[in-house]
Image (tube, helix red, strand yellow):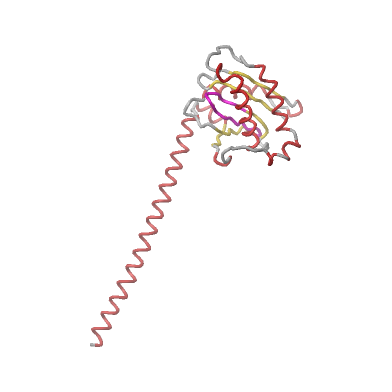
Amino acid sequence: MTTLTMIARVADGLPLAASIQEDEQSGRDLQHYQSQAKQLCRKLNAQSPDRCTLEAGDMNFHYLIAEGVCYLFLCDASFPKRMAFAYLEELHTEFYDQYGKRVTTVTRPYSFIEFDTYIQKTKRSYVDGRARRNFSSINTELQDVQRIMVANIEEVLQRGECLSALDTKASNLTSLSKKYRSDAKYLNTRSTYAKVAAVTVCVITLIIYVRFWWL
């Protein structure tokens, strides 16, 4: 399986470490994906969603932002999202322990390239078929993956739109949806009250009519 893992500083998109595994039989242009990954890292900022999945045809970019660092993973779209983020969480834990205090001080790209050894070892434990079958036993505190924002990589890069803007739009749509549901509930309640009032008026009118008719 073709995979790409990249770790970059969010403040300026500086690559800190990377690891590539190319599947020659897939025929995929890995350099194209590398370029997209670098562009994406440069577009991230402090307001970007801390977890996101970007669709790229039959591949997906998954990223996690923590402590000012972006952990990016490119893999087949069929690869379980929950496993992808568990993998990124594990990378974050180890990388922060080793290099967390030095992240803001480095100026040279790939200053922590030696972290590739750990990336390769950890990735194998997730990509290996046996590990995937036993994934249910992994203890993780990941949030519900269904709530992780999903976008299209080409749209994000071509429009030149920051992910923070997309996240704001998604939040606005959510707010509008909640407002619509609230308004609909209010209108339904008013409609019910109106029907009850109409029935009550009819009953009272009938009672008054019968009373005065028979008196």
Q: Magenta segment, principal secondary structure? A: strand
Locate residue 196: give its quadrant.
bottom left
Q: Quadrant of the C terminus?
A: bottom left
Could you say where residue 49 lies in the image, as x and y percent from the top left? 51, 32
Could you say where residue 84 lies in the image, as x and y percent from the top left? 64, 34
Residue pushed farthest bottom?
A: 214
Locate residue 127: give its quadrant.
top right
Q: Quadrant of the N terminus?
A: top right
Residue shown at 43%/47% (left/top)? 178
| Magenta segment boundaries in residue numbering | 57-72
Residue pushed farthest top?
A: 108
Q: Is residue 70 magenta?
A: yes
Q: Is residue 51 left or right of residue 24?
A: left
The residue nearer to you, when weighing 24 against 147, is: 147
Could you say where residue 42 lies in the image, as x and y percent from the top left? 53, 21
The residue nearer to you, when weighing 154 against 103, is: 103
Residue shown at 34%/71% (left/top)? 199
Q: Is residue 121 left or right of residue 106?
A: right
